[in-house]
Image (cartoon, rainbow, N blue to C red):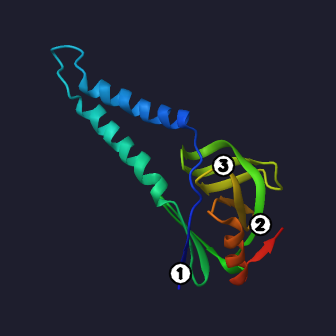
Amino acid sequence: MSEVVPVARAESSPALRLLMWGALLVLLAAALVPVSWEEPPPRWPLLALAAGLAVWFQLAPRRLAYTLESNALIITRLTGRTVLPYTQITARRSAGRLGIRTFGTGLPGYLTGHFTFGPDTVSRVQAAASRSAEGVVVERGGTAFFLTPADPDAFLRSLAERGVTVTA
């Protein structure tokens, strides 16, 4: 039996969302506003790019999921899944915060990839998070994953019930 763990509500400033959607609108305007009579709109490559970005902005945050299966924690992102068997992981609540993104995606509500992290015992994490703080660190073989379940304490209890070592 599997249990889908709700992901925490996205944390992002209205200014950041405005900037993201504003850039998309500028790109759309560039595709549709005529510059000269020799090249009438629409400019299909720019229009396709704007449509692709709009889909990415909407689809990516909705694909982020954590599922507790019978023998493993499954982390689902837009680009794939990570399977973490319970026997190979430890988990704990963290007061740490994502820092600089070194590789990955940083959309409002969808933070995935490699980030610096601190203050914590680990300085780098692989994030699959909806916000930059108030999460859980799950470690497996020297790799730390930063997750943001809606209820971190209930998530940790569920992991402990499945045999995961949960530390303070």
**Tag 3: amino acid:** Ser
Image spot of residue 127 (x, y percent): 63, 55
Secondary structure beneath label 2? strand
Image spot of residue 6 (x, y percent): 56, 66
Tell me the residue that label 3 is attached to: 132
Rate crowding at label 3 as few (under 14), some (14 to 19) or many (20 or more) other CA atoms within 10 Å: many
Return the mark for residue 2: 1
Rate crowding at label 2 as few (under 14), some (14 to 19) or many (20 or more) other CA atoms within 10 Å: some
Q: In this rendering, is residue 161 above or below 122?
A: below
Q: Quadrant of residue 155?
A: bottom right
Secondary structure beneath label 3? loop
151, 31: nearer the viewer = 151
125, 29: nearer the viewer = 29
Chain-order first, disc 1 or disc 3 = 1
Image spot of residue 104 (x, y percent): 56, 47
Chain-order first, disc 3 or disc 2 = 2
Mark pair 3, 2: CA separation: 16 Å
**Tag 1: amino acid:** Ser
